[in-house]
Image (spheres, rainbow, N blue to C red):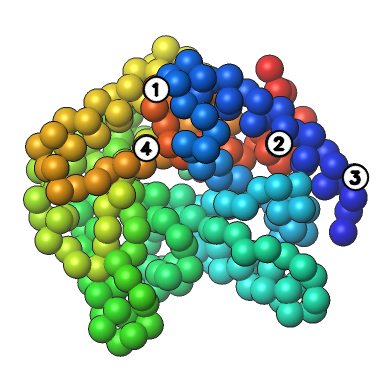
Amino acid sequence: MDISLQDQLRRRREEILFRMDTALSKSGRTLADVELIAVSKTVDVEYVQAAIAAGYRAFGENRPQELARKIDGLEQMRAAGAGIPDVRFDMIGNLQTNKINAVLGRADLIHSISSLHLAEAVASRASRRIEDGLLDAAQPVLLEVNVSGEETKSGFSVDEVRQAIPHLQTLYGIRVCGLMTMAPRGDKKMARATFAGLRELRDELSVEYPDLSLDELSCGMSEDFEIALEEGSTIVRLGRVVFDPAFAVE
Ligand SMILES: *Cc1c(COP(=O)(O)O)cnc(C)c1O
């Protein structure tokens, strides 16, 4: 394995954790309260291996084929004798219905359930797999919410989420664990308003539907993760700040 790559990833990880801890302390939380997902979509499996050696244990991919390729690649390394600990892979990107089977049971968490149609499709395939004994339990998912209302962004509108919850609760193949959003780029104020909006929506739904445990708030990327943590994020999804040495650490 490339030791200098591993060292560089380890140093960067320490800086990231320090910055996360500082942001978390403002809301009385610690690193134990959040999950750091290293978004490995732009790097090869050797980088993932180095990142694991550097301490990362959770990864995110935005394409089902890549998710499968990384998981299989690590499996092959293990089979060849590399001592690689178990790690988690999440699906964070746009999911097409014809690719659902590729991620069911392989993705620990699907962050990107962006419509009722997709939720139903994932739930029905997952139910079938559970009945066939191919899946142990309901697939954990998050609802992607377009809080900022940008036309280019996918996801439920805030109102659509409110309307969809009673129906989503009846779907046996999925377990809704929380909400996910992306902030508009390059505008810190808008980012904060977006993350706060996600948290407020979660709080509102938790009061209205006490049976639902919407614990997870997946928000915060390389440019805005500290703001997201200050606003209650429980899962940050970091790509460039983890893997791109040229990405400026402030
Ligand atoms: C690529 C990606 C990220 C990571 O973005 P960075 O800005 O590189 O940290 C996070 N979430 C999703 C959904 C992505 O596609």
Q: CA distance from mark 4 to mark 3?
A: 34 Å
**Residue 124 quadrant:** bottom left
Q: CA distance from mark 2 to mark 4?
A: 21 Å
From the viewer's perspective, tell me whether residue 75 is left or right of residue 125: right
Question: Disc 1 marks which residue?
Answer: 231
**Residue 162 quadrant:** top left
Is residue 36 positioned above or below 60 on the image?
above
Which of marks 4 and 1 precedes in the sequence? Answer: 4
From the viewer's perspective, tell me whether residue 116 is left or right of residue 249: left
Dot 2 falls on a residue whose secondary structure is helix
Dot 3 falls on a residue whose secondary structure is helix
Looking at the rendered image, the quarter that the N terminus falls into is bottom right
Q: Which mark is residue 217?
A: 4
Residue type indicated by callout 4? Leu
Q: Residue at x 66, y 30 (%)?
A: 16
Q: CA distance from mark 2 to mark 1?
A: 22 Å
* Residue in the foreground of this view, choosing between 104 and 233: 233
Residue type indicated by callout 3? Ser
Which of marks 3 and 4 precedes in the sequence? Answer: 3
Which of marks 1 and 2 precedes in the sequence? Answer: 2
Q: Residue at x 42, y 56 (%)?
A: 109
Dot 4 falls on a residue whose secondary structure is strand
Classify mark 4 as within 8 Å of ligand 1 or not, answering yes or no.
Answer: no
Label 1 crowd bin: few (<14), some (14–19), many (20+), radius 10 Å:
many
Question: Disc 2 marks which residue?
Answer: 13
From the viewer's perspective, tell me whether residue 250 is left or right of residue 23: right
